[in-house]
Image (cartoon, rainbow, N blue to C red):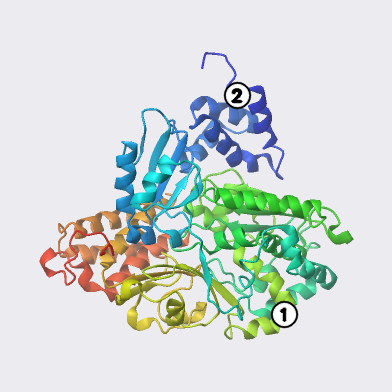
Amino acid sequence: MSSGSPVFSAEEEKTLKAWTTRFPHPNMGLIEALRQVQEWRRHIGTAEESRLAEMFGLPLGRVHEVATFFPFFTQKPTGRRRIGVCRGLSCELAGTNKAVRALGEKLGVGPGETTPDGEWSFEEMECLGACEMAPAAIVNEELVGAATEETARRIVAEPGKDFRPQTVIGPESTEHRLLTGRFGEPGLETLDGYRRAGGYEILKKAVEMGPAKIMEEVKKSNLRGLGGAGFPTGMKWGTVPPKEKMPGPRYVVVNSDESEPGCFKDRVLIENCPHGLIEGLLIASLAIGAEESFIFIRGEYKRQHHILEKALAEAEKAGLMGKNILGKDFSCAIKLTRGAGAYISGLDTALLETMEGKKAWPRQPPPFPTTHGLMNRPTVVNNVETLMMLPPLLRIGGEAFAKMGTAKCGGTAVFSISGHVERPGVYEFPMGTPLRRMIEAAGGIKGGRKLKAVIPGGASTPVLTAAEIDVAMDFDSLRGVGSFLGAGGIMVLDETVNMAFVARNIERFLAHESCGQCTPCREGSEWTVRILDRLIEGEGCPEDVVNLDRTGENIAGKVICALGDTVGSVTRAMMKKFPEDFKSEAGERSSGAGKQPAGTAA
């Protein structure tokens, strides 16, 4: 680019400037503008950062720190097609290493490199939210299927082809499937199909009920937040200040930044029933008095983003969002926005920072988002599944919903099941269903092998042994056995797995995704990975296991968010329950697993 020439064309300038006016505050469009530049230029250089800083009225340093924080943005040009293979736990168990070798042979380059013709860039990536099709592959943020040795080569040879298998949705009986019972019906993802299934009828009912009665039913239902924390939904909404005490805007934000290894249910829910999410979001907005709400979706869910764009356009055209919805005194606009590849953006306050055009550093509460959230306004952040539960909850009533689950966890929950099972997929069960029953519904252990361990709620939840799988799957019961329900990402591990490899995989993920704000997490996660590397290579010392325990102990409770606490708990739980797998002397390994990847036996 010659000196003095415009950084962007007139048409590009127009597109970028539109992001400064789309949201309540100009800065909220910065991530989307950066995404646009990355797609056009295949990198973000100093000139592009400088022009965006001028356009958004921000210091150059602010734009630079955002552009260098999120993995989607690069400072060097990438290929026209960016192919990534997931190295999350379920994918590594299914053969990520083989897929990486096959892609390297086909492309002639390794991970982190670009082909000489500039056509392909090749990356190993953290969890892509597609554990049921492990090892998952993505091209330009769009899931393309399982990267087996064969399909990995075909993905390159046949760009644009969809290799995704159909996701299993179960169990077979639909009796207790409040959300997924009609999945598979033709056209359910469209407005017409959703209305044929009774869609938006509950919104009409909710408008007639009014906020107070909606809140009452939600509290009766014992609906808990299904994104990981499990906080009672009605209680959370109840902490939003009344408009009389805090006038002005308030918001509901859908957290669809589903990035926890082992979790992919939200992706499947959006694919099959986007209007169910929109209806639930409108009901929540009505309940707290929000006239503008948002759906925040992870950038890697490109197909799901398009599905939501289409559904929102249908709803708006039909008068189901915007001004005077259903001809009543209820107005709510819904806007869609994306992340840029950071797992930490899935934490509520880090998500809000991302939406505000900042790097995703979690905030230290108090105050909490329900009083000081997005742009310092009252904000309810709920995940996809929680909000989609609202229409069926109001249809059957709060008390009936509560009775479907346990005393403190009402209704059903949707679980992502992956790893060593015959039929990985999405399964909906009443809260409190035994874990053993869920594994059986997924076909049992693959290949008739023995069960060794289960991670019950996503990679950040402490492991269970084979002897513990009769536990009831709800927030309180799992806490009683030293683990958590989390976001319901069940990863099943058979007898071939060495738990030191499992720990290393998860700790590598946590170290990669640490935002760097808290020193114990930033440094301790890297120390943990280095120690585990030594153990796995047979180069450890007897003190390493002690040091792993001490490192975890010195991180937990000394950080702002739960990611650091995870570093302090996950490996410690594995060492406690599977000590033999962590012995440093190779000759003392009871499994003899030495240097083989976790769970890759034929």
The numbered disc on residue 8 is 2
Which badge, 2 or 1, comes first in the chain's sequence? Answer: 2
Give the secondary structure at mark 2: loop
- Residue at the (23%, 55%) spot, across then down: 533
Give the secondary structure at mark 1: helix
Which residue is disc 1 drawn over?
396
Quadrant assignment for the C terminus: bottom left
Please tell me in which quadrant of the rendered image residue 494 appears.
Answer: bottom left
Front residue of this view, candidates 368 and 125: 125
Q: CA distance from mark 2 to mark 1?
A: 54 Å
Please tell me in which quadrant of the rendered image residue 93 appears.
Answer: bottom left
Expressed as whole percent of the image width and height from the top left, the position of residue 246 reads: 76, 59
The numbered disc on residue 189 is none
Q: Nearer the viewer, mark 2 or mark 1?
A: 1
Expressed as whole percent of the image width and height from the top left, the position of residue 284 reads: 72, 65
Is residue 116 visible to the viewer in this orientation of the structure? yes
Neighbor class of circle 2 (other Cα within 10 Å; few <14, some 14-19, many 20+) is some
Is residue 514 visible to the viewer in this orientation of the structure? no
- Residue at the (26%, 69%) spot, across then down: 496
